[in-house]
Amino acid sequence: MADRVSTVEEHLDRILAAIEPLPDFPQPLMETLGLAAAEDVVSTIALPSFDNSAMDGYAVRREDVLTATPDSPVHLPVVGEIGAGQARLLALSPGTAAKIMTGAPMPTGADAVVPYEWTDRGVAQVRIAYPPEPGQHVRRAGEDVSEGDLLIEQGTVLGPRHLGLLASIGRATVRSRPRPRVVILSTGSELREPGTSLGPDSIYDGNSWLLAASARRAGAIAYRVGIVPDEPRAFMDALSDQLVRADLVVTSGGVSMGDFDVVKEALAPLRTVWFGPVAMQPGKPQGFGVVGEDETPIFTLPGNPVSAYISFEMFVLPALRRLMGKAPYSRPTTRARLTHPVSSPEGRRQFLRGQYDLGRGGPTVSPVGGPGSHLVGELASANALIVVPEDTTGLPAGEMVQVLVLDEEF
Ligand SMILES: Nc1nc2c(c(=O)[nH]1)N[C@H]1C(S)=C(S)[C@@H](COP(=O)(O)OP(=O)(O)OC[C@H]3O[C@@H](n4cnc5c(N)ncnc54)[C@H](O)[C@@H]3O)O[C@H]1N2
Ligand code: MOO
């Protein structure tokens, strides 16, 4: 009897319902690059934390130099020198100046900095040719960040600028969820490792590389286990060996109707993994469930390479993002004008490979190659997927279509 067909959304809901974000903990800053903050970060200090100079020059009381002109400069005795990182805080008496370097604390009493360029750079005495504006070249405490400011909201994906800010407010760690550890197994007795020789009936295992790279690109730690033959026992052995280091398992191949569909054969008896068709093309045969004592989520993707890739994009990527606390889970879609007509099977959402171009007259997308789920050459030259709805069997050139732009960070 034929299995009931799930829609793409039903299958995605099934997956997201079974996956919880990984527990968060404080992680060293550099580890969190690309991860989502799992806390609201509130500053415990002000930035700058003290009034300091924005220029190399002289700290002065402005009223002492108001009359300065190039023809009638003001002369002030230089009572000290303050470098950045020098704790010795001076108090500036009226009628004096102190040399000050960029970033050095302003002496009390001083209210402006005269840059070297307006002076003779005098050591014992300085000649000042122009009067500064009030507060000139003084960086005020708290003008950038105040104590108590909410700087980074929970869920923000941390990039270099966030890490710089966190370090600047003295944070050595930030709470975030760990990178999910993803184990990738390719099944198929026809598969060979790249770099080895090929028999007349064998092919290279492209999928474990495609999937491991996709997982890593999504921020996960990918363990590419590689090839497992079409023997349920060998598959189960490999799987149980790997579960100890897996937050999630992805397999490819062995899930359709063949006589050697190892993944289905091995996992169906457990009754913890759902197998069935999803109304999409490529990617119709799918499986998802949990395995092992820890109920580790497992995705059993179809073996055709384009099917495996599109299944990763549609189902595994959202699951990884949920584990990592990143929203939205699914890649956002955009719209573009179709440059050539396309056709599509009825009743299945089709994902055609395309070349997306921002274009001067608005975004366009051109279909790349055919719909065959074995066409890896054309997959590699695509940068987008054209989404053709289930009830649509053809679209003319010029139509606005839904597009998933691949590789973009979101
Ligand atoms: N009678 C039916 N046959 C098939 C159906 C169906 O509904 N009825 N569905 C077809 C569809 S759609 C797909 S997709 C595939 C999925 O099959 P499997 O998941 O069982 O995958 P395999 O049979 O193991 O392999 C399919 C294809 O992909 C190649 N392959 C597998 N693994 C890799 C790898 N790691 N790297 C590169 N290429 C790989 C494999 O050699 C096959 O050519 O089933 C259809 N059949
Ligand atoms: O659905 Mo299969 O994934 O067309 O090739």
Image (cartoon, rainbow, N blue to C red):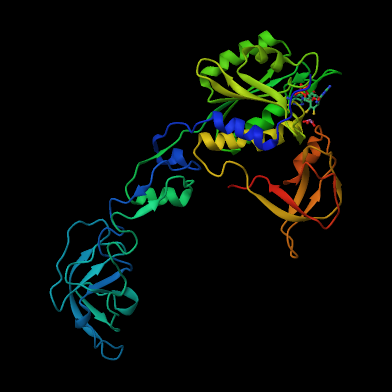
Q: How many numbered dots are placed on residues in this image? A: 0
Q: Quadrant of residue 258?
A: top right
Q: Nearer the viewer, residue 115 or 45?
A: 45
Q: Is residue 325 left or right of residue 273?
A: left
Query: Observer-nearest residue: 236 or 350?
Result: 350
Tell me if residue 77 comes above or below residue 152 in the rendering.
below
Give coordinates of residue 249: x percent, y percent.
60, 24
Residue 126 visible in the shown view: yes
Q: Is residue 297 left or right of residue 101?
A: right
In this rendering, would 225 be left or right of 356?
A: left
Residue drawn at 25 percent across, 72 percent down? 58
Residue 224 makes an appearance in the image: no
Identity of the residue drawn at 48% across and 33% down: 21
User: Residue 265, how many percent across, how many down?
Assistant: 71, 13
Residue at image position (43%, 43%) is 37
Residue 125 quadrant: bottom left
Q: Is residue 115 above or below residue 36?
A: below
Residue at screen point 85% across, 18% down = 201
User: Relative to the observer, which residue lies in front, 294 or 366?
Assistant: 294
Q: Quadrant of the N terminus?
A: top right
